Amino acid sequence: MKYIVIDGIKCEYDTERSVLEVALHNGIEIPNLCYCESLSAYGGCRLCVFENERGGVAAACTTPPRDGLTVRTNTPKIREYRRGILELMLESHNTDCAACSKSGKCRLQEYSKRYGVGSVRSAGYCREPVDDSSHSIVYDPSKCILCGKCVRMCDELQNVRAIDFMERGNDTYISCGEGYRLADSSCTGCGQCAAVCPTGALMLKSSIERLRDAIADPGKKLAVQIAPAVRIGLAEEFGLAPGRSVMGKAATALKLLGADYVYDTSMRAYQTVICEAEDFAAKRGTGTVFSSYCPAWVRHVECDYPQLLPQLSTAGSPMEVCAALIRLKHAGSGVISAAVMPCSAAKSEAERPELIKNGDRLVDIVLSTQELAEIIRENGMNFAALPETPCDGLYSQITAESECLSPILLSIDESRCIGCTRCAKACPVGAISGAAKKAHSIDAGKCIRCRICTSVCPKEAIGSTANPAVAKRVAAVNGLAEADALAERIKSGEAWYDYVEVMACPLGCPGGGGQPEACCLKRQNKTVALLELEEEYTAPAGEPVSAESVITDGDKSLFRVNYI
């Protein structure tokens, strides 16, 4: 095995692209601001420099590893070099850190403290106006350090290219184009740019104040739904076991904050699967049908692939379905409908005119997982110590009453499954069953394809497959660049599929733009641990109801969205 020596530690490597990757994969941190494992090397921040055997200085992120290479990353020369770089960055940076929502999590702030960089002479920061035109993202150019991670993310992984560098030299800044704002661009609101931003230049638009106002209104009731992937984000954020269900703790936290009703989105998400199956049956034979419950993907189609709009399923997203049922249950009571989502694009989705049903907007407030975690901390709650509170009964989970007719299913590869039971314990609807140390199985009549199981499986044993009863070829794609490549192959006739499921974020909903950083950047803990499958899943108590009794012919439009 090839190796390099970093600060006296022998570090083996195989496919790593750079000295920085070798160091990180061997548990050695080298300061960096422009590196991201999923993106191309840029070498812009110069913080990751090292000193080689000859005393030369080079950037670790752009230097390929060489067998036997010896480097030092923390010499007095290197520390002084980094201190100078940080001072230059801070001179052109808005240092109003106390008022910055990224304070405490800002990498620039962290490194400045580490290397003893205090007050610096301001040379003037970018005076371009703050862009808060998007419902999902806020861009503050005065906090941008030009690391380029957002530009590369939007270009390389998402293929949206909504932002890029403008001007040159000291006048350089990042923008959507001269005279254009985020709302005017092809930005999908996926939030992946904000997920990789090391400072507070790109942040999710906060809805915390709107939630506080709703709680403080004595004449209104507040109903909050929580999406399945939020539990993964909260577990990561508060240091709990990966894949552990924390829905009960989240419900407790929301009730303590002042929510009157807390609902589990996953209990109603199968209605999306039912609508999707009906829509696929109606569109079959007209070409490839594409999923529509990822709002960032829908926005991308509207901007770049308008010819595909007729091929989008009209099935509403799980958030829309649950919100419609909340409106049905609390009709005429003036309830405020809020949602906690892993997806930043859900904020824009809630504002779409198509989501006004019977005169009411389905969702009034959308919070990200990050925002819920922030509120919990602000209120001094010890999340790990909170008791479990069951979610309120809306309607019992709607499941397939006969054979599941969804064109795409999740399946477990028995040859790879080690029976760790993590997927079964993480599944929010009890669709996965099996004993410890034995291969598990998925009940298609319950599965809502939230893909939490795929994010916690340590062996990547869970994947998508076609439902042989209704489809021959299906595909599931994460990331808009991958979706674009597949769409082009379908358009050229190189590939053919009955159905394609698209999630805009490269890691799907569990890695959505509203999730904590560890979820977005592939740092989830997937350590294998054998757990006991304690009990079979039991749905929370609710009103016994079938799909037919909830959704009459006249009400079916509540759960559908036509984007044409």
Image (cartoon, rainbow, N blue to C red):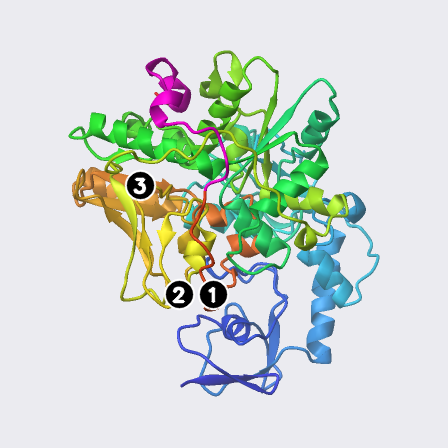
Residue at image point 71% right, 17% down? 219
Quick check: marks 1 and 2 in contact, CB under 8 Å?
Answer: yes
Mark 3 lies on a secondary structure that is loop
Q: The residue under label 3 is which amino acid type?
A: Gly
- Residue hosting label 3: 445
- Residue 164 location in percent, x, y? 51, 43
Sequence-earlier tag: 1 or 2: 2
Q: Which residues are magenta?
A: 539-561
Viewed as shown, does residue 341 lie left or right of 295?
right
92 w.r.t. 554: above or below: below
Determine crowd level at label 1: few under 14, some 14-19, many 20+ residues with C-alpha closer than 10 A.
some
Q: Which residue in the structure is indicated by mark 2?
A: 436
Tag 3 and tag 2, C-beta contact below 8 Å? no
- Rendered-image quadrant of the C terminus: top left
Label whose residue precedes the other's in the sequence (1 or 3): 3
Q: Residue at x 71, y 78 (%)?
A: 77
Which circle marks residue 531 in the picture?
1
**Quarter of the image where one finds residue 446:** top left
Judge from the rendering whether residue 442 lies leftward or rightward of residue 381; answer left or right: left
Number of residues whose C-alpha sits closer than 10 Å to that of mark 2, classed few (under 14), some (14–19) or many (20 or more): some
- Foreground residue among 44 and 221: 221
Label 2 sits on a secondary structure element that is loop
Quadrant in which the N terminus is drawn = bottom left
State the image coordinates of residue 174 (x, y, percent, origin top left).
58, 43
Residue type highlighted by circle 2 = Ala
Q: From mark 1 to mark 3, how far is it between C-alphas? A: 25 Å
Q: Is residue 437 above or below residue 26?
A: above
